[in-house]
Image: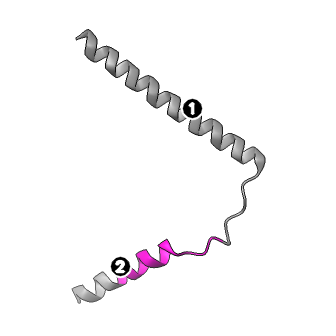
Amino acid sequence: MIKTDANARRMREANNAFKSVSNVKPMTDYAKAEKSIQDNRERLKAERLAREADAKESSE
């Protein structure tokens, strides 16, 4: 029974990994720009938080 469950789980994972991407709509220029802005904002936030953490550690 356990072997069957493991095989079923592996089959689901494989099916999800190899799903057809034909249903995905191409990104519009607007969506690309928005994604780029969001990615940049997240990167800058991560850098700022790292700098603040370093400054806090060096002051202690």
Label 1: few (<14), some (14–19) or many (≥20) C-alpha neighbours in 10 Å: few
59 on left or right of 45: left
Q: Quadrant of the N terminus?
A: bottom left
54 on left or right of 16: left
Q: Quadrant of residue 56?
A: top left
Residue 23 vs 15, above or below: the answer is above
Report the amino acid beneath label 2: Arg
20 on left or right of 53: right
44 on left or right of 25: left
- State the predominant SS element of the stretch in magenta: helix
Task: Tell me if residue 12 is in the magenta stretch.
Answer: yes
Q: Quadrant of residue 34?
A: top right
Q: Residue at x 52, y 28 (%)?
A: 44
Q: Residue at x 29, y 89 (%)?
A: 4
Q: Residue at x 48, y 72 (%)?
A: 17
**Distance from Cα at disc 1 to Cα at disc 2:** 37 Å
- Residue 29 percent coordinates (x, y): 77, 47
- Residue 52 percent coordinates (x, y): 38, 19
- Residue 28 percent coordinates (x, y): 76, 52
Give the secondary structure at mark 1. helix
**How many numbered marks does the figure carry?**
2
**In the rendered structure, which segment of residues is drawn in magenta?**
8-21
Q: Which residue lies under the disc numbered 2?
A: 9
Asked whether 3 or 22 is in front, the reply is 22
Q: Residue at x 22, y 85 (%)?
A: 2
- Residue 25 percent coordinates (x, y): 71, 63
Q: Which residue lies under the disc numbered 1?
A: 41
Task: Tell me if residue 41 is in the magenta stretch.
Answer: no
